[in-house]
Image: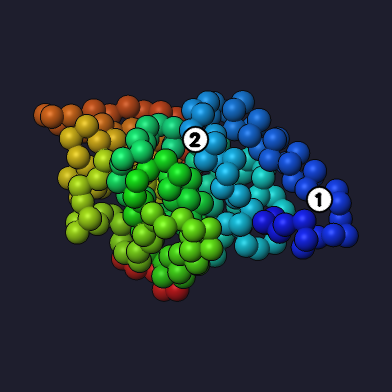
């Protein structure tokens, strides 16, 4: 996946195959509505294959969610693209992600924002994602083990917040930690059903809510995980 030519002298076809898979990957993103050039560039640069570390690794360039450790999932690439696009990240923004999972979404955000905080309730996921961020030199990401439904009061407020697990309602602490003019994207609904992806914009006087599309995410669970 990240091997240079010196690591794979026996298979000269590999880099061509990789280039083709990447082209198909980007084409699938575009055809599903990911049109923002900055988002597409970030998704071209960050190799999803590195974030899927199990038997499913060879399906990393297909537009489907895949299992990761701790019984969680890495989201479908087109959903990552559409959520990132809806977040309208500016280069000077500080972003909070709730639900580090594999770290893929945070890595994409790191290309668009000044600073990314990402939290997960599983220590193991935070540790493994942190290792990848170091390996990829993504120095503007801080990964923290925490119950993200409380946000990160010490680092708040945030310009943008993205929640990649489904909540029954947008969590109050996260709304409070959004700057005026800030945007939060969050899947809302029952955990075992199809949820609605909601875009919340904080105005001077309150919050505007816009329903974007149906999605399916693992639930936002309170407290820390066992691993
Ligand atoms: N964004 C991830 C996919 C997230 S899957 C990626 O790019 O791979 C959802 C993640 O949310 C899981 O890892 C789960 O452990 C985490 N999660 C669920 N409830 C949480 C909570 N209360 N606080 C922090 N993380 C939570």
Residue 188: image quadrant is top left
Q: Nearer the viewer, residue 172 or 2?
A: 2
Secondary structure found at label 2: helix
Q: Nearer the viewer, residue 130 or 29?
A: 130
- Residue 23 image offset from top left, x and y in percent: 70, 35
The residue singled out by tag 1 in the image is: 14
Secondary structure found at label 1: helix
Whether 218 is drawn above or below 23: the answer is below
- Residue 216 image offset from top left, x and y in percent: 48, 42
Q: Which quarter of the rendering shows the N terminus?
A: bottom right
- Residue 112 image offset from top left, x and y in percent: 42, 40
The residue singled out by tag 2 in the image is: 39
CA distance separating discs 1 and 2: 26 Å
Query: Which residue, as the protein is rendered here, is positioned at the far front?
Result: 6
Say left or right for 142 vs 68: left
Q: Nearer the viewer, residue 219 or 83?
A: 83
Mark 2 CB lies closer than 8 A to ligand 1: no
């Amino acid at each position: 996946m990240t091997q240079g030519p010196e690591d794979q002298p026996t298979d000269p076809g590999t880099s061509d195959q990789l280039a083709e898979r990447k082209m198909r990957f980007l084409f699938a993103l575009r055809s599903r509505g990911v049109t923002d050039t900055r988002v597409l560039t970030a998704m071209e640069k960050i190799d999803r294959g590195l974030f899927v570390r199990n038997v499913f690794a060879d399906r990393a360039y297909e537009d489907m969610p895949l299992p990761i450790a701790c019984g969680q999932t890495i989201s479908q690439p087109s959903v990552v693209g559409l959520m990132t696009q809806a977040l309208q990240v500016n280069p000077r923004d500080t972003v909070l992600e709730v639900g580090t999972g594999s770290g893929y979404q945070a890595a994409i955000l790191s290309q668009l924002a000044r600073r990314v905080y990402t939290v997960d309730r599983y220590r193991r996921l935070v540790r493994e994602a942190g290792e990848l961020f170091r390996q990829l030199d993504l120095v503007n990401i801080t990964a923290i083990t925490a119950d993200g439904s409380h946000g990160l009061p010490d680092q708040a407020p945030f310009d943008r917040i993205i929640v990649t697990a489904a909540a029954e309602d947008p969590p109050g602490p996260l709304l409070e930690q959004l700057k005026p003019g800030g945007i939060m994207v969050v899947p809302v609904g029952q955990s075992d059903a199809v949820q609605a992806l909601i875009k919340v914009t904080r105005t001077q006087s309150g919050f505007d809510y816009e329903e974007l599309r149906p999605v399916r995410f693992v639930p936002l669970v309170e407290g820390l995980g066992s691993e």
